[in-house]
Image: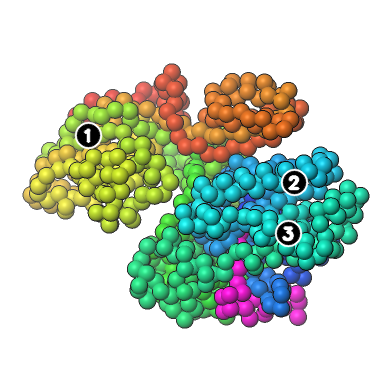
Amino acid sequence: MGRREEMVERVSALMDDKKHIRNIGIVAHIDHGKTTMTDNLIAGAGMMSEELAGKQLVMDFHEDEQKRGITINAANISIVQHYKDADYLINIIDTPGHVDFSGDVTRAMRAVDGAIVVVCAVEGSMPQTETVLRQALKERVRPVLFINKVDRLINELQVTPEEMQKRFAKIITKFNDSVRKMAPPEMRDKWQVRPEDGSVCFGSAYNNWAISVPFMKETGVGFKDIYEMTSSNRQKELAHKIPLYKAILEMVVNHLPNPHDAQKYRMATIWHGDPESKVGKAMANCDEDGPLSMMVTNISIDPHAGDVATCRIFSGRVTKGMKLELVNSVKQNTVQQVGLYMGAERINVDSVSAGNIVAVTGLREAYAGETVCEERIEPFEAMKHFSEPVITKSIEAKNTSDLPKLVEVLRQVAKEDPMIRVEINEETGEHLISGMGELHLEVISDRIRKEKKLEIETSPPIIVYRESVTKVSPEIEGKSPNRHNRFYIIVEPLEDAVYNAMAEGELNERDMKQSKAFAKKLEELGMDKEEAKKPWSMHNKNLFLDCTKGVQYLNETKELLVQGFKEAMDRGPLAQEKVTKVKVKLMDAKLHEDAVHRGPSQTLPAIRRPIYAAMLSAGPVLLEPMQKVFVTVPSEQMGSVTKDLQGRRGQISNMEQDEDNIIISGKAPLAEMFGFAGDIRSATQGKALWSTEYAGYERLPSDLQPKIIRKIRDRKGLKPEPPSARDFME
């Protein structure tokens, strides 16, 4: 029997023993050592050579990950480790650290209960460290801390033991401050990490050793020994005395929750159904004998098996041949195969029970975020991504005969990566693909060429703008083509607090069903009490309100009006970009008594046109995507960095001294950030460390508006000049 088959047997034997399961995510800033650390855990389970651990990077099995030297996709593996007379099943998800792939981190956090946050001892806590920590805490995933690359502190920076301890204290304090700020109130103190209790480990994943305070007592190896052995090049001896996987395993078993305990407090956040129902109790107790309920956290396409859904099972058991309900898609599918992840491989098993992460084929209509169950249940809470697609490329098949294949491949790409938006512009016949950044789109394009075997051509990157308004419009009348129906519309900016709550995922369309609670929330966020009672629809962070009184036949027309509102919000009047942060109020309506005269062809233009006219009368503006920029640079190079950033319309918000370095924080428009990496490298002789983070949309300076609008309209084949309100009022 091979090592993998033996591991599958051991995993299967432990699947129902909830107390001995840990579902963990490995999260960090890019290049802080997540995949290197995961190698050590896999080697500790006997599934790869200990000599190669930290060098082989088993979980980066895609060709482009190996070529670029970064993790692009979250990768799963199930292993068994032995600790204190018991075997533990550890389901691991190794996640990407690059900001362009942060959507994978969000989805992985729904599947796990605990996270190891890896921080580089040399670079310290970075912006993406805080982002991944926030993503974990939002999902009520408990974090612990591994401070990596300690060997580099000793050998490269040649810090003294005292300086080393100071650096550790600084990283731990910053980590705990973030937990205190972002964790649920009842977890803020409980989830603080403390070296003395073993919830912090220190080590070198590349050299395969790690230590924690309890592990020091156990092994007799202290910081003094580590310092001496590392500086005298005896790290192999150190790895033998204090193997990394043992220190990390001790931390995982003692400080991260098992699914039985975690689901008791996680379910209230991720599922809003009745906790007293049969399925509600089964999920809270992680009961494998209850009705099956699971959530799809990822979709990958297998050329032989089709769609492979990665699911976290919250109750029940999934078995081959089961007929399952996809709640949001309102479809039924039959499970073809049930499998366990072993890195690049998927091994089929008979069934997998609650509290585990499973690979399922046969769920053809599923997507990441879908609720899958035996009996229809309230869907799981949608996953809240912290950024959105901001860059677009147009994509074409080199050979016209490949056009049908391109459409199919783009459909697959959008399914595999929910952070990719695919749009076919029917007027120009263009295929547009939008993503989180240049690297994101570059990776997707490469995979289409290599993995999907399709020759394509792509345009240079195009920035994705948004349209909005700055003031209240007058009331605008919209008439249906037959003149029998009239709608009266006012458009105004959406309150900042309401918009921010939508962006944070605290308000969503599903909540609108609980109309009283939703109205109360809107009111608390500063909306007028009467208006707060009247939301009809939410779309692209815009709100549609019914402010009418006693209009006949309005309810019969509601569905079409909401559709018209959504269409208008998907393509604004200035440049056909998406609309955001707008409140559309239906003030009054006059409707024909005969339903035949108020069908889609009459109602849709009659609602869209006055929305456009009102927007164009309400100080219409373009919003541009912004990036937070963080640069750590030696003091003498500071001027070069600030000059470069300000030359890109950037604003410096903070500068702080960190030993010999200056940490510069600022914000700059994404449109100005092309080529930043090369410029900053040459300006600082390669001494700058930098990272960026999505920072939402802000108003484009008024002197640039006409030029950018014209450029977008020209690209889309529209008349160069945007329409006026009068064009929609005829």
Percent coordinates x, y for residue 658 in the rendering: 69, 33
Gap between marks 2 and 1, in whole Å? 61 Å
Label of residue 213 in the image: 3
Q: Which residue is mark 2?
A: 165
Gap between marks 3 and 1, in whole Å? 64 Å
Percent coordinates x, y for residue 6 in the rendering: 72, 78
| Neighbour tally class for label 3: few under 14, some 14-19, many 20 plus, Cα within 10 Å | many
- Dot in front, 2 or 1: 2
In the rendered view, tell whether residue 319 sits above or below residue 676: below
Percent coordinates x, y for residue 169 in the rendering: 68, 46
Query: Which residues lie in the magenta part?
Result: 1-26
| Neighbour tally class for label 2: few under 14, some 14-19, many 20 plus, Cα within 10 Å | few
The mark that comes first in sequence, 3 or 1, is 3
Instruction: Mark 3 and mark 1 in contact? Answer it, CB < 8 Å.
Output: no
Tell me which residue sits at (75%, 74%) in the image.
3
Label of residue 490 in the image: 1
The mark that comes first in sequence, 2 or 1, is 2
Instruction: Mark 2 and mark 1 in contact? Answer it, CB < 8 Å.
Output: no
Q: Is residue 313 visible?
A: no
Please identify the quadrant where the C terminus is shown: top left
**What colouring does the structure picture have?**
rainbow
Q: Residue furthest left?
A: 593
Q: Toward the viewer: 132 or 597?
A: 132
> Is residue 15 shown in magenta?
yes
Q: Toward the viewer: 389 or 293?
A: 293
Percent coordinates x, y for residue 278 in the rendering: 37, 76
Gap between marks 3 and 2, in whole Å? 13 Å
Residue 564 as seen in the image, left or right of residue 708: left
The mark that comes first in sequence, 3 or 2, is 2
Q: Amino acid at mark 1?
A: Ile
Q: Is residue 558 visible?
A: yes
